[in-house]
Image (spheres, rainbow, N blue to C red):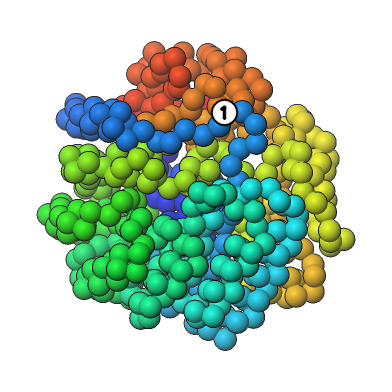
Amino acid sequence: MNVLAALRPTDSERGAEEEGEQVPEGGAGESNSWNGSSTAAELTTLEAARSDQAQETRRFPVPPVAETGEGPLGLYIHIPFCARKCPYCDFNTYARLEPLYEAYSEALCRELGRWAARLDGRTVHTVFVGGGTPTVLSSVQLRRILELVHDRFALADDVEVSCEANPGIKDRGQFALLHSLGVNRLSMGVQSFQEEELAFLGRIHDAKDALGSYEAARDAGLTNINLDFMFGLPRQSVDAWNDSLDRALELAPRHFSLYSLIVEPDTPLAHWVETGQTPAPDDDAAAEMYETAMTRLGAAGYAQYEVSNWARGAGFACRHNLVYWRNQEWVGVGPGAHSHLRFPTRLRGESSGDLPILSGDPVDGVTGSGGPAVAVRWSNRKGVQGYIKRVDADESPVDFHEEISAEVSMGETMMLGLRLVREGVPFARFEAMHGVPLRAAFGPSLDRLQEQGLLESDRERVHLTPRGLLVGNRVFSEFVA
């Protein structure tokens, strides 16, 4: 994975910043022509940006999490519907399924109810309502879902409740509704302030809509807002990117997520590129835009805490996404939603139709690698109608599961954690999670990567260097079991 591959939303982020929840991959398997053969100018730019980030770390540290005991638990709720599916999107979302909205919201609430019972009072620290576009649902349907979450789950006193919203939302009164239902973080997929770019991306909003929705959300009391933007579009100029950044920075949101456009297989965009209707994204131009964003956001007071994410002020990093990047635990509900729990899962079994994974103990005792299972992940059936049918029949919607060995879990902690450019992987958290000191698990790899200038460490943590950021796949491959 090079830096541009890292800049697409990971499947976990798509469950968190405008997307459908999937198992975190950290961009693994992505590739493009900018392979990290960095120039001196590129490294100088990134070194300067890292220096700015170090200053921001001192000013706005990412809130620490407990290093021992039961870690935070996230809850992801997938709304798989969109008014229109964007031509670059390969996630589990669907347009023109309005007749299923009511049946789906009822089935979703049934699955949520089952999970509330299984968790049996375990505290939920973050909730993310993503998609798709949750705000395509009616006010009645949104109220039903969010009131159930508040009534049935044991939410932390400082729970982060995030919800995605499309800037093209027609009923802006929904912002006040979301605020009244406990949503305290909003994520809006603006993507661009250039009209021609929005048209190319198939968005249903224009720049004026985005500005109006942002102000309406703030007026409704939603002050913790993330704005998503995309760069590296075919024919996109650095001047156009700078103009979008200018207009975005004028709004001064609490958070930015910036992603490089990736041509995913079997999407309309892939067909356009394959047939010559549009050129492929220019990776060199995208790299320049990324470096420009790093410099400009840092100068504006935003701390880059993850490869694609910036926060302005203490406490405004997305805590739900931190659960993914720290390889902690979450439950996903809805079609295609993924979950990840550690053994023993401490779940209360209740339905004979559930897979054995929900019993709280390893199913097979060993994983494919021959080691004992320390965690399990699973995903629900993707199709909306199939999902509804299974839930209505009181059957498990789970279509896939795998048990994770200690070796694989430690490697995933490194792959995901190294995306956190400031925090990296803390030694204390790694040992508390895996029962093994990080250096005992990966000492030779750490030494080799530090000698190559790709990793650096202090007494508390290990993290990527600017050079390591440019050749992420080379670093991550050291930790793949």
Q: Position of residue 142 (x, y in %)?
A: 53, 74
For label 1, the SS is: loop
Q: Quadrant of the C terminus?
A: top right
Front residue (pair 118, 191): 118
Front residue (pair 375, 262): 375
Q: Going 82% across and 36% down the picture, which residue do you hit?
A: 365
Q: Going 31% across and 42% down the picture, which residue do you hit?
A: 313
For residue 395, say whether it is visible.
yes
Residue lying at the far right in this picture: please name it.
352
Q: Going 54% across and 49% down the picture, which residue do you hit?
A: 157
Residue lying at the far front in this picture: please name it.
157
Name the residue tied to disc 1: 67
Q: Position of residue 257 (x, y in %)?
A: 34, 51
For residue 130, say whether it is visible.
no
The crowd level at tag 1 (other Cα within 10 Å; few <14, some 14-19, many 20+) is some
Q: Is residue 206 above or below residue 76?
A: below
Q: Is residue 33 above or below residue 383?
A: above
- What type is the residue that disc 1 sits on? Glu
Q: Position of residue 248 (x, y in %)?
A: 21, 57
Q: Going 55% across and 32% down the picture, which residue do you hit?
A: 66
Q: Position of residue 46 (x, y in %)?
A: 24, 31
